[in-house]
Structure formats: C-alpha cells, structure tokens
Image (tube, rainbow, N blue to C red):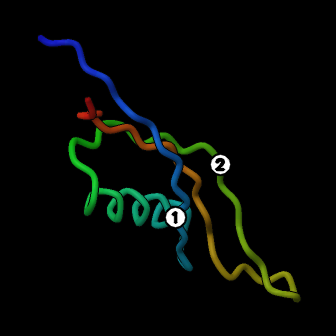
C-alpha cells in the first residue's frame, strides 16, 4: 500500500431538527465537491436560539478528512 496524505477541513452544518441532521448535512454537502472523504469527527455541538430562548437551529462543527492529491 502506498503512503497517503490526508487534508482536514472544518465545516459547520445546520439543521432545524437535530445535531445529527446538521452533521449529516455538512458531510453530504462536502461530498458533492470533495473526493475520497475518509473520516468526519464531530468537534462541537451548539444551538441558535431566538429572543425567547426557543431553539431555532442545531449546529454541528465537524472536521472532515479526505485524500490529498496535490503536488
């Protein structure tokens, strides 16, 4: 097996339903423009709230790694 190099980027996904959906949205969007996705690590979870304290959206900050094919 040849040696490989992987790049890691940080993404933030959002969802009005759940943290899981937020993370999934980020990975699925990244998959549209990146090849060879390898690992997604959830780094932070938080929520956005309105003035009354009602949750408006869930946010998942994730690190995604993919195979680096640069020179």
Residue ID at (71%, 68%):
47
The picture places residue 34, in percent across and down from the top left corner, at 27, 52
The picture places residue 49, in percent across and down from the top left corner, at 77, 79
Mark number displayed over residue 33: none
**In this figure, which residue is indicated by the disc labeled 2?**
44
Q: Mark 1, residues whose alpha carbon is within 10 Å: few (<14), some, or many (≥20)?
A: many
**In this figure, which residue is indicated by the disc labeled 1?**
13
Helix or strand or loop: what does disc 1 sit on? strand
Q: Quadrant of the N terminus?
A: top left
Task: Between residue 68 and residue 41, name the one nearer to us.
Answer: 68
Taking the view exactly as shown, the residue that stands out farthest to the left is: 1
Reading the chain from its start, which is encountered first: label 1 or label 2? 1
Task: Between residue 1 and residue 18, name the one nearer to us.
Answer: 1
Could you give the CA–CA distance between mark 1 and mark 2, rounded to whole angstroms? 11 Å
Q: Quadrant of the C terminus?
A: top left
Residue ID at (56%, 79%):
16
Q: Mark 2, residues whose alpha carbon is within 10 Å: few (<14), some, or many (≥20)?
A: few
Residue ID at (63%, 76%):
57
The picture places residue 66, in percent across and down from the top left corner, at 32, 38
């Amino acid at each position: 097996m040849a040696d490989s190099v992987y790049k890691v980027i940080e993404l933030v996904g959002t969802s009005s339903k759940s943290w899981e959906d937020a993370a999934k949205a980020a990975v699925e969007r990244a998959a549209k423009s990146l090849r060879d996705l390898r690992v997604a690590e959830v780094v932070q979870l938080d929520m956005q709230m309105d003035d009354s304290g009602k949750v408006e959206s869930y946010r998942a900050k994730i690190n995604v790694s993919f195979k680096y094919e640069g020179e």
